[in-house]
Image (cartoon, helix red, strand yellow):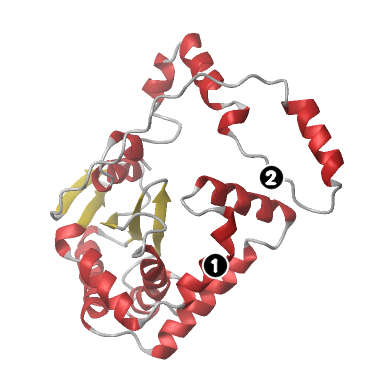
């Protein structure tokens, strides 16, 4: 939906993080052959890639094959240095977006988060599980099961290299329900900002996270993807084994702390999607 791109422009601080990965149609139409060749020769090269080999293999033979097929490929052109994200202005943003092709009125709601793998990111991830993950999460129980305020509800923390955001999307029956549904969500968020999470609820969130984390090692492809993502992240491969413990050690005071810092109205972005 076009509204998703419009929402990204509001919640992320700069063009590098807010534009669509593939660009807009008019951007693609303007590309020249020289543009495509420059991009390919700069980024699709061995010195900007990681090769993960997973499974049962002979290390010496594997190195021979890697050298045979990749060793002769020249290094790429020097890439332009990445521009660091600009700090977001802490102010509440509420806008509307008209999207005639949307199946029903809806809204996007988001909060700018701490940088991925920062100290705050671990309790923020647990908070995400408490709020949104699974049919026993706080928002699903209230919005979908108990009060039937939304046709569908989805969301979670989204990482975009060195920035992150907690994003929530809800599809409603009509435009009047947008306000009602948002107030219910704000109410649940306020509870997280003012009351400690119980030990049982915290443990349940950690169990769900651990299950999802371990599923990333269920196949050889999953393991390779995990290694590649870790290599490009701020975490070194040597420290990757200790990541799970950082999530499992999160305390109720850390959860209420990050909720207070990041889930306030002054850090929120709302985009109401209207169909007429």
Q: In which quadrant of the rendered view does residue 265 lie?
A: bottom left
Q: Check if mark 1's residue and mark 2's residue have beta carbons within 8 Å.
A: no
In the image: residue 107, left or right of residue 141? left
In the image: residue 173, left or right of residue 48? left
Query: How busy is the neighbourhood of tag 2: few (under 14 within 10 Å), some, or many (20 plus)?
Result: few
Residue 137, above or below 93 = below
Q: In which quadrant of the rendered view does residue 125 lie?
A: bottom left
Q: Is residue 18 visible?
A: yes
Nearest to the observer: residue 16 or residue 56: 56
Nearest to the observer: residue 223 or residue 168: 223
Question: Whole-percent x and y of residue 194?
Answer: 20, 81
Nearest to the observer: residue 136 or residue 85: 85
Q: Mark 2 falls on what kind of element?
A: loop
Q: Which residue is mark 1?
A: 242
Residue 118, above or below 250 = above
Q: Mark 1 falls on what kind of element?
A: helix
Residue 230, above or below 85 = below
Which residue sits at x=49%, y=49%? 233
Sequence-first tag of 1 and 2: 2
Which residue sits at x=50%, y=10%? 33
Which residue sits at x=24%, y=84%? 195
> Which quarter shows the C terminus?
top left
Q: Which residue is mark 2?
A: 52
Question: Whole-percent x and y of residue 114?
Answer: 31, 58
Q: Is residue 134 visible?
A: no
Query: How busy is the neighbourhood of tag 1: few (under 14 within 10 Å), some, or many (20 plus)?
Result: few
In the image: residue 14, left or right of residue 151? left
């Amino acid at each position: 939906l076009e509204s998703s791109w419009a929402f990204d422009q509001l919640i992320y601080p700069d063009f590098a993080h807010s534009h669509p990965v593939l660009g807009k149609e008019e951007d693609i139409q303007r590309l020249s052959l020289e543009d495509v060749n420059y991009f390919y020769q700069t980024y699709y090269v061995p010195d900007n890639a990681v090769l993960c080999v997973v499974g049962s293999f002979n290390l010496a033979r594997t190195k021979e094959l890697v050298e045979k097929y990749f060793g002769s490929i020249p290094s790429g052109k020097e890439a332009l240095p990445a521009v660091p994200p600009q700090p977001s202005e802490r102010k509440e943003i509420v806008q509307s977006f008209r999207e005639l092709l949307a199946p029903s009125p809806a809204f996007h709601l988001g909060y700018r988060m701490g940088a991925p793998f920062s100290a705050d990111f671990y309790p923020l991830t647990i908070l995400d599980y408490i709020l949104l993950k699974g049919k026993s999460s706080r928002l699903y129980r209230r919005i979908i099961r108990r009060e039937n305020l939304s046709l569908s509800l989805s969301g979670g923390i989204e990482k975009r290299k060195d920035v992150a955001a907690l994003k929530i999307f809800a599809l409603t029956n009509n435009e009047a329900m947008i306000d009602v549904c948002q107030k219910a969500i704000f109410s649940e968020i306020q509870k997280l900002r003012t009351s400690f999470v119980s030990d049982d609820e915290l443990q349940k969130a950690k169990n769900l996270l651990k299950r999802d984390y371990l599923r990333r090692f269920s196949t050889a492809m999953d393991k390779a993807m995990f290694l590649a993502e870790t290599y490009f992240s701020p975490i070194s491969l040597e420290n990757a084994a200790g990541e799970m413990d950082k999530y499992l050690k999160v305390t109720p005071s850390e959860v209420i702390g990050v909720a207070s810092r990041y889930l306030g109205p002054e850090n929120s972005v709302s985009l109401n999607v209207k169909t007429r």
